[in-house]
Amino acid sequence: MNDAKYRFPVILRQVTDDSANFKPLPKPTGAYPYRLNIDNVPGLNAEDFRDRMAFHMVGDTGSARQSFFQEPIASALSRQLDDTERATPAFLYHLGDIVYNHGEAKEYPAQFLGPYRNYHAPIFAIPGNHDGDINPESADPYESLDAFLEVFCDSQSRPISFAVENPRMSMTQPNVYWTLLTPLARFIGLYANVTKFGTITDEQRTWFIEELIEAGRHAQAIIVCVHHAPYSADTNHGSSQQTIDLLDAAFEITGVYPDLVCSGHVHNYQRFSKQYSNDIQVPYIVAGAGGYADLHSVALENAPDVSPLTGDDSVALAAYCDDRFGFLKMNIQKIGAEIQIAGEYYTLQDEDNFQPVLYDRFEIPCRRSAQLNLD
């Protein structure tokens, strides 16, 4: 890492109030409390993941502008599905911003369905701000997240109307914020709307608190996903104080702390570690270098547009990559009475070498013993 760059999260010095851009949420397509069991996903069987599960994570894969790395990232992810020497990922969990700039259905074939045509495993997602935005110049009026709902939140799995002969079927997530249930982990996905730093309604906040309480009762890892990065040291977005406040308050209220928080929004890779007052450490990972045309740089310490995030010296940047595109491959394994999370971040070197190279590896011990059973 560059010694002249920040090792702690930053905030932007100049922030514009864009709260007026908030978009009403669509109606859920499933029943409260918006959970999807992996057993109910075609091609997946919970019994296969009792002791071990691998999966991909990445965000910001879309790009309306020409991007040399959008297709190569998708291809690298697809090739890992066929790697018989390593644990095969069961699915991809997308961290948002699937299409730019306005979540239009017409952009899905070129920005998502086409590049991921050969990814023959299920793809889950939370929406990013661009997925929920609306193009004011569109000739065909639509509501926020209309296309996202058809692709990811359908009432049943079926061909996507705008898929242009693409074989991918719609996913059946019950809502734009929702929980994925697997034997070894619960993925609690939040939707922070279209504002730059995220906006989460009181209704969603209440749901999140309830999901944390329920998750704390089970012998599973807890992974919280939200598109807007709570912590970042970059010069484009910086940290989201709104998201930090929401997460920290929910953790304190419930007494339940996740094993990992994952985000996109910022177009790079950053791995933070936060030390809470009760000695609990939570990793916060940004994985938003999934293919958008531009990457975001980590700020130099003398950068004029950012300031250190004050009042929170418990967060440190453990690793980052801001000059290459990449993605996460995660493994969760039951070892005796414990659950262990291991992560690998792969990067693509340059436009002449699209072979993924291991850049960062980390391990996270789960705080909930595999012997826990409160059902």
Image (tube, helix red, strand yellow):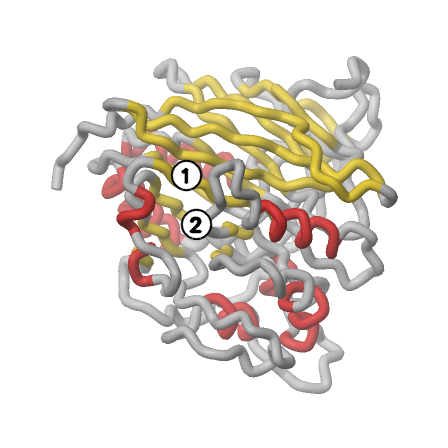
Residue 322, located in which quarter of the rendered image?
top right
Q: Residue furthest front?
A: 84
Instruction: Give the image location of residue 78, x and y in percent.
Output: 61, 52
Residue 253, located in which quarter of the rendered image?
top left
Instruction: Give the image location of residue 372, x and y in percent.
Output: 18, 30
Q: Residue furthest left?
A: 375
Image quarter (top left, top right, bottom left or bottom right) of the C terminus:
top left
Compare residues 287 and 87 and report the one nearer the observer. Answer: 87
Q: Residue at x 57, y 24 (%)?
A: 361
For badge 2, the amino acid type reads: Gly
Side (left or right) of 317 relative to 137: left
Residue 112, located in which quarter of the rendered image?
bottom right
Side (left or right) of 175 relative to 56: left
Image quarter (top left, top right, bottom left or bottom right) of the N terminus:
top right
Instruction: Give the image location of residue 247, x and y in percent.
Output: 43, 37
CA separation in Å, label 1 and label 2: 8 Å
Which residue corresponds to mark 2?
189
For badge 1, the amino acid type reads: Ile
Which residue corresponds to mark 1?
223
Marks 1 and 2, the one that precedes in the sequence: 2
Marks 1 and 2 in Cβ contact (< 8 Å): no
Element on which disc 1 rests: strand
Compare residues 101 and 342 and report the one nearer the observer. Answer: 342
Compare residues 236 and 69 and report the one nearer the observer. Answer: 69
